[in-house]
Image: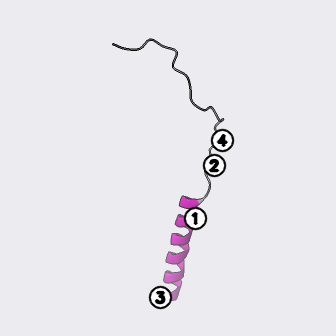
Amino acid sequence: MKRAWEEMMEFMVEAVMHIFQPAKDNYPASGVQPFTGEPSR
C-alpha cells in the first residue's frame, strides 16, 4: 500500500514539474510583422 502511494505521488510530482518547467522552444524573436498588403473593402 505504501509503495503504491509513493509511486502515485512521484507520478503527480513529475507531471506538475513537466507542466511548470520553462519552455524548450527555440524560436527566434521576430516581434510584430508590419502589414504590407492591400486592405480588404
Reply above or below: 7 against 27: below
Residue 25 percent coordinates (x, y): 62, 44
| Mark 2 and mark 3: Cα distance apart in space | 37 Å
Q: Nearer the viewer, mark 2 or mark 3?
A: 2
Q: Amino acid at mark 2?
A: Lys
Residue under pointer 3: 1
Q: Quick one: label 3 or label 1, which is nearer the N terminus?
A: 3
Q: Position of residue 32 (x, y in %)?
A: 57, 30
Q: Amino acid at mark 4?
A: Asn
Q: Could you tell me which secondary element the residue under label 2 belongs to?
A: loop
In primary-sequence order, the first of circles 2 and 3 is: 3
Q: Which mark is residue 17?
A: 1
Q: What is the C-alpha distance between the residues marked 4 and 1?
A: 20 Å
Is residue 37 found left or right of 31 in the rendered image? left
User: Which residue is located at x 51 percent, y 88 percent?
Assistant: 2
Mark 1 residue element: helix
Residues in magenta, as a range: 1-20
Label 2 and label 1: CA atoms lie apart by 14 Å
Q: Is residue 28 left or right of residue 32?
A: right
Residue hosting label 4: 26
